Image: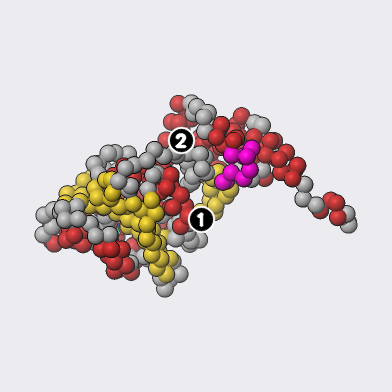
């Protein structure tokens, strides 16, 4: 078959028509609403909208063809997120979609999906505490980025009397460094087994300015510190984009959020072997989530490992006066 040149030409009308068609359906608009600050797999979305997987796949295909959603492969699963607005109609559509109320039963099903993700992560650390260090070393152990992290931390010149909070300290290997540098350190972990390992570390190192707290960093208020740190924790969070809002609340005005995290990778075995919910993150994703949470980007360091993984060490600053900021209309994901 031969195609005439006119048949191959790009017609902007098709693009607009696809956008109108995709947006012309209440279910698809509500899917876009659910994706406003999260990303979900097709099964999760089918659960959230209480419908079959094949029906949901059809709607996602229409949204993808219209450029309203983008996909990201996470191991065997494909996650859908909102695409960044491309054009005025697209932006206006998302703005109005964000005004749609989310009924309580759907909110409950979204919470159930988040709960399932969090349970996978908690169960992993409960099972793996006895073998924690070997598990960490499979991808990126602290020794591989400790010096760079300390260099970044020390470059921030915290005042004497400053406080720190480490979220997800694991076996507490970094706590002695924080205890040396800060007047008071809080270590917050949602795994009793991991907290027990951290407690043993604090006792053997004689750390008397570290307070260990059992709690979920995403669900509870635990006060604020001048320096909040997460090392290899973000990819275990059920809702990493949403987490930034909560993390920003833990950082005092003028303080810092420091994150050591894997760059995006395709090693899906890490889900099973290391309990990772997400296969690292794009640098831009962290920047976007942080700025949506009112934080300002600071220095970043990137470390390539021999095993092919790459680590990003990121600093985000809390302004002295937190400006009003919006959240939820900029295609934030996952
Ligand atoms: C991979 S380990 C990292 C441990 C340590 N930071 C390191 O780099 O060696 C992740 C830690 O985060 C904790 N964690 C995961 N989700 C959490 C949450 N929502 N709130 C608090 N801690 C969490 C886990 O229990 C675990 O101790």
Which residue is rendered at x = 63% and y = 43% of the image?
Answer: 87
Q: Which residue is mark 1?
A: 75
Q: Are marks 1 and 2 in contact (CB under 8 Å)?
A: no
Residue 257 against residue 91 in the figure, above or below = below
**Mark before the other along the chain sequence, 1 or 2:** 1
Which residue is rendered at x = 27% and y = 59% of the image?
Answer: 156
Which residue is rendered at x = 47% and y = 59% of the image?
Answer: 264
Is 277 on the left-hand or right-hand side of 192?
right
Which residue is rendered at x = 38% and y = 51% of the image?
Answer: 296
Quadrant of res 129: bottom left
Q: Pick whichever, 69 or 286, lies toward us.
A: 286
Q: Which residue is mark 2?
A: 110
Residue 319: in magenta span:
no
Q: Pick whichever, 2 or 321, lies toward us.
A: 321
- Residue interval drawn in magenta: 83-91
Residue 34 against residue 2 in the figure, above or below = above
């Amino acid at each position: 078959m031969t195609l005439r040149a006119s048949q191959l030409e790009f017609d902007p009308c098709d693009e607009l028509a696809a956008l109108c068609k995709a947006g012309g359906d209440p279910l698809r608009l509500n899917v876009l609403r659910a994706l406003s600050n999260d990303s979900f797999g097709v099964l999760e979305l089918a659960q959230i909208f209480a419908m079959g997987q094949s029906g949901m796949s059809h709607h996602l295909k229409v949204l993808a063809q219209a450029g309203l959603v983008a996909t990201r492969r996470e191991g065997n699963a494909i996650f859908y997120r909102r695409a960044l607005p491309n054009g005025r109609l697209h932006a206006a559509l998302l703005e109005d979609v964000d005004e749609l109320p989310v009924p309580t039963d759907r909110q409950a099903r979204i919470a159930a999906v988040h709960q399932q993700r969090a349970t996978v992560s908690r169960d992993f650390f409960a099972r793996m505490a006895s073998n924690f260090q070997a598990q960490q070393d499979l991808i990126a152990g602290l020794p591989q980025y400790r010096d760079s992290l300390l260099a970044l931390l020390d470059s921030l010149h915290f005042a004497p009397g400053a406080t720190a909070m480490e979220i997800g300290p694991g076996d507490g290997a970094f706590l002695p460094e924080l205890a040396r540098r800060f007047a008071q350190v809080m270590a917050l972990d949602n795994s009793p087994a991991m907290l027990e390992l951290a407690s043993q570390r604090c006792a053997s190192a004689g750390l008397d300015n570290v307070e260990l707290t059992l709690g979920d960093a995403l669900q509870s208020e635990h006060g604020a510190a001048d320096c909040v740190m997460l090392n290899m924790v973000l990819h275990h969070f059920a809702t990493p984009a949403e987490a930034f809002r909560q993390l920003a609340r833990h950082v005092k005005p003028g303080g810092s959020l420091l994150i050591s995290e894997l760059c995006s990778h395709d090693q899906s075995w890490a889900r099973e072997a290391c309990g990772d919910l997400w296969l690292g993150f794009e640098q831009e994703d962290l920047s976007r989530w942080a700025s949506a949470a009112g934080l300002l980007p600071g220095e970043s360091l990137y470390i390539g490992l021999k095993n092919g993984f790459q680590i990003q060490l990121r600093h985000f600053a809390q302004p002295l006066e937190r400006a009003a900021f919006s959240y939820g209309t900029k295609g934030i994901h996952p």
